[in-house]
C-alpha cells in the first residue's frame, strides 16, 4: 500500500519569542511525509531548486520516503516561507512567502505515485493540488489541507478541489472564513454539503475535532511543559491522521477508526512542536508514538455513566 502527498518542500525562517532559525528544512509536504512514513510507504510530489542539497533530501530518504517525484529545477530557488510567533505561541504572522520554483511547477507523476491508494493534497497552490488529484484516479481516500492565503486568492480552484475529496483538514478560523459561518460546527456542516464526508478542524494548541454526518469526536492537544516551534504541527497532525487511515484500508471509514486516527495525529504533532522544524520527528521512534497515544487516552477518558443525584 502507498500514500502520495503533494505540497510545499521548503526552507523556513522561524522566530519565536525565545529563539530564531534563519533557514531550516520545512514545507507542508516534508512535515506530512515524515509523520505519515510511520504508517505507510510515502511518495512525495514537489519541486525544489538547486539550493536543495543531498543532505536535505536525505532527511526524507533516511525514512524510506520516496523522493522520485521531487523535481529539481536547475538554477531555481526552493520555496521559502518565514514566520514570527506571538507570545502565546499559538498565532503567528507570515513575514514572507516566496513561491520560487512552485510558480511554474507542473507536476508529472510516476506510475508509483499515480497508483497510491491514499492521496494527501498538502498546502500549496490549489491548481497544483487539482492537477495531482486528476492524475491519481486510483486513490480510495483523498484529503486536502489549505490556508487563508489560498482562500483569499484562489478560492474557485480550492472549491473545485474540495468538491472532489473525501476529507478536508483546516484550521478552525479557515473553515469559518471559507464558509462564512461563525462556529466550527456550522462551518463543518456547510463543508459536508460541499463534497467531503469528513471534516477535520484543527484548533492549534487547543486540539482538533473531526466531524462527519454520523457524529463527531474532539481531542485536546497533548499537554507539554514547553513548546519550541509550532511550525509544521498541522502537517504532522495530518501525517499521523491520514497515515493511520491509510494503514486501515477498510471502507467506509468508521468513526472508531477516525477517533484513533485523531489520537495518532495529535501524538505525532506533539513531538513536532518540541523542537525546531523537522528535528524531533526526524528522530522520533514508533514506540514513542505508541506510548504517547496511551498517555493521551489515559488523560482524556472518564466514566460519564457514574450514577449521581443532583440537587436540582
Ligand atoms: P503549519 O505550521 O502546519 O501551518 O505548516 C507550516 C509549513 O507550511 C511551513 O514549513 C511552510 O514552509 C509551509 N507553508 C507556509 N505557507 C505556505 C504556503 N502559502 N503554501 C505552501 N506551504 C506553506
Image: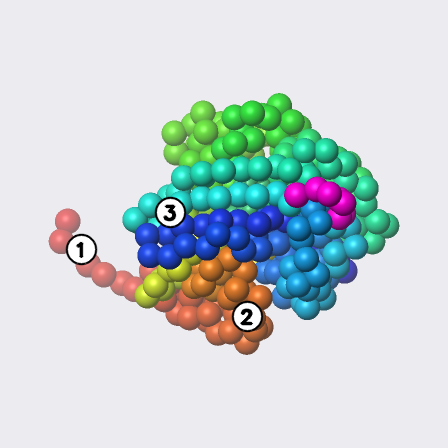
Q: Is residue 135 left or right of residue 23?
A: right
User: What range is drawn magenta here?
Assistant: 71-77
Distance, label 2 to label 1, CA atoms, is 47 Å
Q: Mark 3 sits on what residue?
A: 85
| Residue located 13% across and 53% down the image | 311
Q: Is residue 203 left or right of residue 3?
A: left
Label located before the other in sequence (2 or 1):
2
| Residue 127 pos. (x, y %) | 69, 31
Label located before the other in sequence (1 or 3):
3
Q: Nearer the viewer, residue 307 or 165?
A: 165
Q: Mark 2 sits on what residue?
A: 284
The picture quadrant for ligand 1 comes to top right
Q: Is residue 46 left or right of residue 115?
A: left
In which quadrant of the rendered image does the N terminus lie? bottom right
Q: Which numbered tag is attached to residue 310?
A: 1
Residue that protrudes farthest toward the front in the picture: 75
Label 1 within 8 A of ligand 1 by Cβ: no
Element class at badge 1: loop
| Residue located 64% across and 38% down the image | 100
Residue that protrudes farthest toward the left in the picture: 311
Amino acid at each position: 500500500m502507498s500514500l502520495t502527498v503533494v505540497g510545499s518542500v521548503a526552507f523556513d525562517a522561524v522566530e519565536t519569542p525565545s529563539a530564531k532559525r534563519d533557514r531550516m528544512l520545512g514545507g507542508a509536504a516534508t512535515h506530512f511525509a515524515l509523520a505519515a512514513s510511520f504508517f505507510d510507504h510515502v511518495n512525495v510530489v514537489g519541486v525544489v531548486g538547486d539550493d536543495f542539497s543531498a543532505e536535505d533530501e536525505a532527511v526524507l530518504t533516511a525514512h524510506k520516503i520516496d523522493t522520485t517525484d521531487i523535481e529539481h529545477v536547475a538554477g531555481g530557488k526552493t520555496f521559502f516561507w518565514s514566520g514570527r510567533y506571538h507570545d502565546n505561541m499559538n498565532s503567528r504572522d507570515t513575514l514572507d512567502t516566496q513561491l520560487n520554483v512552485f510558480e511554474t511547477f507542473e507536476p508529472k507523476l510516476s506510475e508509483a505515485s499515480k497508483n497510491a491508494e491514499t492521496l494527501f493534497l498538502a498546502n500549496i497552490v490549489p491548481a497544483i493540488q487539482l492537477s495531482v488529484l486528476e492524475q491519481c484516479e486510483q486513490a480510495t481516500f483523498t484529503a486536502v489541507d489549505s490556508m487563508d492565503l489560498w482562500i483569499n486568492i484562489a478560492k474557485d480552484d480550492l472549491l473545485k478541489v474540495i468538491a472532489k475529496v473525501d476529507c478536508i483538514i483546516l484550521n478552525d478560523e479557515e473553515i469559518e472564513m471559507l464558509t462564512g459561518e461563525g462556529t466550527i460546527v456550522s462551518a463543518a456542516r456547510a463543508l459536508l454539503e460541499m463534497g467531503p464526508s469528513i471534516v477535520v478542524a484543527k484548533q492549534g494548541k487547543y486540539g482538533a475535532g473531526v466531524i462527519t454526518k454520523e457524529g463527531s469526536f474532539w481531542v485536546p492537544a497533548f499537554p507539554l511543559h514547553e513548546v519550541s516551534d509550532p511550525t509544521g504541527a498541522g502537517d504532522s497532525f495530518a501525517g499521523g491522521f491520514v497515515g493511520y487511515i491509510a494503514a486501515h484500508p477498510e471502507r467506509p471509514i468508521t468513526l472508531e477508526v477516525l477517533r484513533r486516527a485523531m489520537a495518532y495525529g495529535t501524538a505525532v504533532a506533539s513531538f513536532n512542536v518540541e523542537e525546531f522544524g523537522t528535528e524531533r520527528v526526524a528522530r522520533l521512534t514508533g514506540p514513542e508514538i505508541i506510548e504517547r497515544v496511551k498517555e493521551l487516552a489515559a488523560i482524556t477518558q472518564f466514566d460519564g455513566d457514574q450514577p449521581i443525584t443532583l440537587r436540582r
